[in-house]
Image: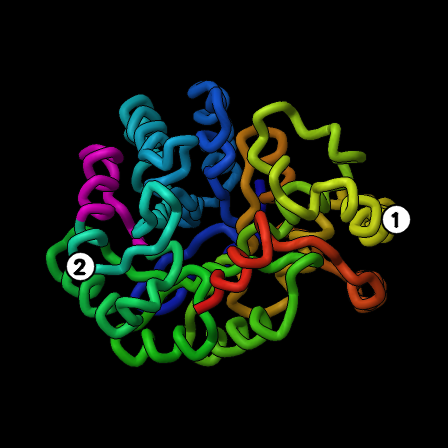
Amino acid sequence: MVTQSIKLGGTASDVVVARVAHGLMAMTLNSPPVPDETCFEAIKAGVDALPPGVKAFLNAADFYAPDSGTANLEMLSRFFNKYPEYADKIFLSVKGGMTVNLQPDGSYEYLKKSVDRSIKALGPLKKIDLFQPARIDVKVGIEKIMETLVGFVKEGKFDHIGLSECTASTLRKAYSIYPISIAEIEVSPFEYGEEQKNVIATAAELNISVAAYSPLGHGFLTGQIKSPDDLPQGDWRINMTRFKEEHFRNNMALVDDLVQIAQKKGISPAQLCIAWVCTTGPSVIPLPGSSKTSRTLENLMAGDVVLTDEELKAANEAIGKHQITGDRYFGEDIDLHLWH
């Protein structure tokens, strides 16, 4: 059983969750999706590993599917139908507000459509605890987006509000309108620049949790992927520039250094990265994704790992000396529009 837990922020500050969250994207994004029983066992194992009173923090979306549909939430609906007693043991965050072409739409009409379809797909046994637009629609603006989301809270559609891929200034502006509970941003040894540091500092100041997604660099930092050829056919990561041959070898140099530090401590490279992400701020919650029970438990146990000053220094030195190449996702044009 894992021992470490953390309180969420904003209006969810009375909620205690595991030190490490669980992202569900990989369960339904590829085709074919992971079998239900495999997903169910991974979710159950993560919940069962927690002490009484500590909730599992699950992160889902209404577009985690090859067709940008609600397969992720439909899978969760089947899970809660089979295991209704787990509903109260889970804090569920749902991202939405993305069109079928994965463009942000923060209009009232589209956010209502996204929230309502999420509620319908999830079914009656589990309420959405927190909803967050997956990207900030700059055409609408954060003020109008927040006005819409606060209205949905008052209508009882969900309890708490989060933001994803937001800048520190946007987070502060949103918080002045309503207490944001979670800011979801990418944080890992691959991704820890000024924007991440600014969001983490602002969140700590305002008592907002930071859900640090992709702490393992989409699996790159686990050390399990030795070449681009190791990615299975149909895996969405094949299209990520960091996994392409021209960048892969360069980026593996950091992975090799982290593997050595992890081996010396007797933990996995994944656990080292997750433990390192925990050190980036007092309200930071690593959010790795997994569809396997063994990986879910390995990730959770990383929340109990304490890095010594010497180990943290070695990790920071390794991260500082390597220049990571390739874009965060699929190309520079997309990456430039992530933060708003």
Picture residue at 65% right of the left edge, 48% below the top: 216
Upstream in sequence: badge 1 or badge 2: 2
Q: Crowding at label 1, few (<14), some or many (≥20) Cα neighbours within 10 Å? A: some
Query: Where does the image place residue 11, in percent across and percent down from the top left?
Result: 30, 66
Quadrant in the picture for residue 246: top right
Question: Does residue 285 appear anywhere in the picture?
Answer: no
Q: Is residue 264 above or below residue 161?
A: above
Quadrant in the picture for residue 275: bottom right
* Horizontal side of residue 190 vs 32, given as left or right: right
Mark 1 lies on a secondary structure that is helix
Distance between the alpha carbons at the discs numbered 1 and 2: 50 Å
Picture residue at 35% right of the left edge, 30% below the top: 71
- Disc 1 residue type (three-letter): Gln
* Labelled disc at residue 260: 1
Query: Where does the image place residue 82, in percent across and percent down from the top left?
Result: 31, 22
Whether residues under marks 1 and 2 lie with C-beta atoms below 8 angstroms apart, the answer is no
- Disc 2 residue type (three-letter): Tyr
Residue corresponding to mark 2: 108
